[in-house]
Image (cartoon, rainbow, N blue to C red):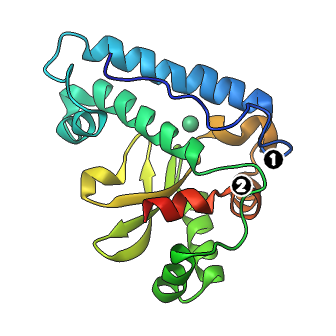
Amino acid sequence: MPLTLPDLPYAKNALEPHISERTLEFHYGKHHQAYVTNGNNLIAGTEYENLPLEEIIKKTAGDKEKAGIFNNAAQVWNHSFYWKCMKANGGGKPVGAIANKINSDFGGFEQFVDEFKKAGATQFGSGWAWLVLDNDKLRIVKTANAENPITQNLKPLLVVDVWEHAYYLDFQNRRPDYLTTFVDKLINWDFVNSQL
Ligand code: MN3
């Protein structure tokens, strides 16, 4: 099976009170699992069967006839990455190489936060807000639905899921509050540094 559900890097209640165990039961246990199951069913017996996940995503991106495979494969990648972008007692100002690079490329941490939260808040409908490396420069990008920056030769460093299923049980329609909580309480900067 080319798509697998990775273990969560923490217990399902580890992100409480910010993201509840119930949200992770649905988001990881139902939504993420469904992308794995549905993607594997679509990929079985095709030319993509023995390819690494990133190759499946790049080879099916933009092909309307392969949209089902792309959407499920990319959502598996996006969610596996999103879980690693959070930790208990995370968030706040970064340290290390990413802190210096944010200062030099955005002009300061507050400027980065404003742009990142704005990207998440203004992504109309479902999607993702990302911190990426564009060659050697940090950029914020947002993507719709399952879209992933690796198809544009950008290297993801951090992502926040702004599909309603990510926050509705805990924040209802208050997406900006979810984004503020993500930045202030949840970002795993050690992981972001490891990707730089
Ligand atoms: Mn999601």
Residue at 62%, 21% in the rendered image: 29
Crowd class of label 2 (few under 14; some 14 to 19; many from 20; radius 10 Å): many
Residue at 31%, 24% in the rendered image: 68
Query: Which picture quadrant has residue 163?
Result: top right
For the C terminus, the quadrant is bottom left
Of residues 52 and 120, which is closer to you in this image?
52
76 relative to 65 in the view: left or right: right
Query: Which picture quadrant has residue 108?
Result: bottom right
Q: What residue did someone put label 1 on?
A: 18
Of residues 177 and 27, which is closer to you in this image?
27
Q: Is residue 19 above or below residue 149?
A: above
Q: Is residue 63 above or below residue 30?
A: below
> Do callouts 2 and 1 mark residues in contact (Cβ within 8 Å)?
yes
Closer to the N terminus: mark 2 or mark 1? 1
Residue 181 horizontal/vertical position (percent):
76, 57
Q: Hey, what amino acid is under mark 2? A: Leu
Q: Secondary structure at mark 1?
A: loop
CA gap, disc 2 and disc 1: 8 Å
